[in-house]
């Protein structure tokens, strides 16, 4: 028993001694004149960091498992390779630091408060960063873990060569209490290599801890290059910019500028202006309630941009109530000035020029995107952009306006982009009361890109197909057809110039303007009669044309139009590479007529400047005979112009069937 009591007294003694020593140690650390250690601390930290560290005025420490350090006139130099001399230079700095992680070489700073700081941040493409507090500036483990940051009057210089960024930011903290956004900032410099400015307000305490998700309020007005942004909302995580909830207004000169700024692939467009709501969780950006305009076209819908995969994915649905066709021009390589609008002056078919040489021409304004004398768009496809992301976006439009050459009325397209392969599948357009539907596929993994176009035409109304030509508006009949082409190229002009495949068009039973037939047949008497008494329609039995296409050269398999008045047949070629025409049409009337110089009609020239006129050799014979007979008797001269009508009905379907390209042979089934 005596030994037990003795041991108990010894234990209490040593326990009391340990507690007393700990208390004395704490009191000693608390009241220790830490300032006398500034010089050795400066030397020790500088050696560990491989750069100058200096507290020039005063140092105080409040010890604990999380110690509080206050330093006046603090300087932390940058590595020699950095542009700015100092990583941090502040008139005063107070921070909390956890002791246990520090023993394992990890710096955890739950709180930092800076007064009058100048901060120099730089990250190089090789991974080196100035804020890595170790000799190895590429080590991510040397980057301090910061909880919250409070700053008052200072500047930040940020350089990131890989991002094309060189920014200077000035900020100040309002002294008044009760202000919602006390931190005011202004920024200028370059972002993605483009001039950049920004200004706005934010919450006073910046929360960087992953465990802290208190919304950080912010509002910003920024401009980069030709793009400007206004946004107001909150950010839950400043480190990874997660938990963003904000409303925004975005505007610029072209959507393709967003690729350089944000990495989102968009086509070249007219100026735009949008507003909506932005939400970001982890690596998923979501934009909802989109409302805005693209040129004169309205747009609405929602989009998401997922950056979690190696190739980001853009998904969503966008719609327009009204699409101005001129706004679509830049997407296919034309500027708005080159896209004709319905307000343009209509061509005149009743001028004093000879009927055979009248040509409907549409003048196209010159543009830097177009080769002089060419019509097909030459804007090139940026292959690198197609490989930088994936997409699955649906776009639809209820009404397409200001289209003169082709009467579109509505449309939709499903845009799919995967591993550099762009597909418009399906694409559907309302054209003259009918539809044009199919797929367009662009594979950018080959050089030049391989393009496949398969389109089917259904139920297009003939009287609405050529709105600029008055004499066709009373025509009846529906048009169908198919286009199956493959080619290679970086533009529409190159693709068509190298295209191979086939195309065919068939017009069913209906009515067509007789005056057009008389123009084709150069029937002077009928033209005069119709011009004096007015036009009338004749029955259209059918019309068909089919072309084989090889390396951009279209060669006719069949050209035929059969009416109750005339049978027109033809042959010829169209060069998509040279944009030239060479078509010969022959008209065989079914009635009798005077003043008929029915020679074949030659359509030639270029897409931009086509010509039409009678075949000179054939016409010369007819005119020569008329002059010879007229020299004997003027009335006999009319005999050479009288047409007895040898034309017969044509079977268009049979013509197309006979001229159809042979189907590829199928291998016999294995037994």
Image: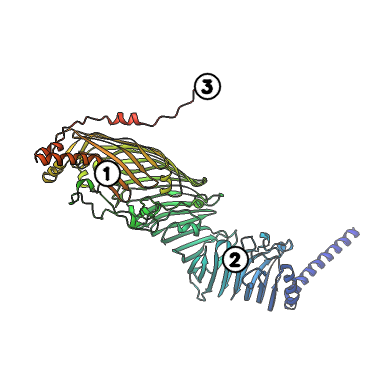
Determine whether label 2 and label 1 are within 8 Å by CB: no
Question: Residue 504's x, y, as percent?
Answer: 34, 36
Q: Is residue 647 above or below residue 670?
A: below
N-terminal of the two: label 3 or label 2? 2
Circle number at residue 148:
2
Closer to the camera, 15 or 636?
Answer: 636
* Residue found 23% across the figure and 48% down from its top: 358
N-terminal of the two: label 1 or label 3? 1
Neighbor class of circle 2 (other Cα within 10 Å; few <14, some 14-19, many 20+) is some
Q: Would residue 538 be found to the left or right of residue 661 on screen?
A: left
Question: Residue 134's x, y, as percent?
Answer: 70, 65
Neighbor class of circle 1 (other Cα within 10 Å; few <14, some 14-19, many 20+) is many
Label 1, secondary structure: give it. Answer: helix
Question: Residue 5's x, y, as percent?
Answer: 87, 61
N-terminal of the two: label 2 or label 1? 2
Question: Could you tell me how far apart the alpha carbons at marks 1 and 3 are, in whole angstroms?
Answer: 49 Å
Q: Residue most toward the bottom?
A: 57
Determine whether label 3 and label 2 are within 8 Å by CB: no
Q: Quadrant of residue 661?
A: top left
**Mark in the foreground, 3 or 2:** 3
Neighbor class of circle 3 (other Cα within 10 Å; few <14, some 14-19, many 20+) is few
* Coloration of the structure image: rainbow
Label 2, secondary structure: give it. Answer: strand
Q: Would residue 293 be found to the left or right of residue 516 on screen?
A: right
Residue 9 visible in image = yes
């Amino acid at each position: 028993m005596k030994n037990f009591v003795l041991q108990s007294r010894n234990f209490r003694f040593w326990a009391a001694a340990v507690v007393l020593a700990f208390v004395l140690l704490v009191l000693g650390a608390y009241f220790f004149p830490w300032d006398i250690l500034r010089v050795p601390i400066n030397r020790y930290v500088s050696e560990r960091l491989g750069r100058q560290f200096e507290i020039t005025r005063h140092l105080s420490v409040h010890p604990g498992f999380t110690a509080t350090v206050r330093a006046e006139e603090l300087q932390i130099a940058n590595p020699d390779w950095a542009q700015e001399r100092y990583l941090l230079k502040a008139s005063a700095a107070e921070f909390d630091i956890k002791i246990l992680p520090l023993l394992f070489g990890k710096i955890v700073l739950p709180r930092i408060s800076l007064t009058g700081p100048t901060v120099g941040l730089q990250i190089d493409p090789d991974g080196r960063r100035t804020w890595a507090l170790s000799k190895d500036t590429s080590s991510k483990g040397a980057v301090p873990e910061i909880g919250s940051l409070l700053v008052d009057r200072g500047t930040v210089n940020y350089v990131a060569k890989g991002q094309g960024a060189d920014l200077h930011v000035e900020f100040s903290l309002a002294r008044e209490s009760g202000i919602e956004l006390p931190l005011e900032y202004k920024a200028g410099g370059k972002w993605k290599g483009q001039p950049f400015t920004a200004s706005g307000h934010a919450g006073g305490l910046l929360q960087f801890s992953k465990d802290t998700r208190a919304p950080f309020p912010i509002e910003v007005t920024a401009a980069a290059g030709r793009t400007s942004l206004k946004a107001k909302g909150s950010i839950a995580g400043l480190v990874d910019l997660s938990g963003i909830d904000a409303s925004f207004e975005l505007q610029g000169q072209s959507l393709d500028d967003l690729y350089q700024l944000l990495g989102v692939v968009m086509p070249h467009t007219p100026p735009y202006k949008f507003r909506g709501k932005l939400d970001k969780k982890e690596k998923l950006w979501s934009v909802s309630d989109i409302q805005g305009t693209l040129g004169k076209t309205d747009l609405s819908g929602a989009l998401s941009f997922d950056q979690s995969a190696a190739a980001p994915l853009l998904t969503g649905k966008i719609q327009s109530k009204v699409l101005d066709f001129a706004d679509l021009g830049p997407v296919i390589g034309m500027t708005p000035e080159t896209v004709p609008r319905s307000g343009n002056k209509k061509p005149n078919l009743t001028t004093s020029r000879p009927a055979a040489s009248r040509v409907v021409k549409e003048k196209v304004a010159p543009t830097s995107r177009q080769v002089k004398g060419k019509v097909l768009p030459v804007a090139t496809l940026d292959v690198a952009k197609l490989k930088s992301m994936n997409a699955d976006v649906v776009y639809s439009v209820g009404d397409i306006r200001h289209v003169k050459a082709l009467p579109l009325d509505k449309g939709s397209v499903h845009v799919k982009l995967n591993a550099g392969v762009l597909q418009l599948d399906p694409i559907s357009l309302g054209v003259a009361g009918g539809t044009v539907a199919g797929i367009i596929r662009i594979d950018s993994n080959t050089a030049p890109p391989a393009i496949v176009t398969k389109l089917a035409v259904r139920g297009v109304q003939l009287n609405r197909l050529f709105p600029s030509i008055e004499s066709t508006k009373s025509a009846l009949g529906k048009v169908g057809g198919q286009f199956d082409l493959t080619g290679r190229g970086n533009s529409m002009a190159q693709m068509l110039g190298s295209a191979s495949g086939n195309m065919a068009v068939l017009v069913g039973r209906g009515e067509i303007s007789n005056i057009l037939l008389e123009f084709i047949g150069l029937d002077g008497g009928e033209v005069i009669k119709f011009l004096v008494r007015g036009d009338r329609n004749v029955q259209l039995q059918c019309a068909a044309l089919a072309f084989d296409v090889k390396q951009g050269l279209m060669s006719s398999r069949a050209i035929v139009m059969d009416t109750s008045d005339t049978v027109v047949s033809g042959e010829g070629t169209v060069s998509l590479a040279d944009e030239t025409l060479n078509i010969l049409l022959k008209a065989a009337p079914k009635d009798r007529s005077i003043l008929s110089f029915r020679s074949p009609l030659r359509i030639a020239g270029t897409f931009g400047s086509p010509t039409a006129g009678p075949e000179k050799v054939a016409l010369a014979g007819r005119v020569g005979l008329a002059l010879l007979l007229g020299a004997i008797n003027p009335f006999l001269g009319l005999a050479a112009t009288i047409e007895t009508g040898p034309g017969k009905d044509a079977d268009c379907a049979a013509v197309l069937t006979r001229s159809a390209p042979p189907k590829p042979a199928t291998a016999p089934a294995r037994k």
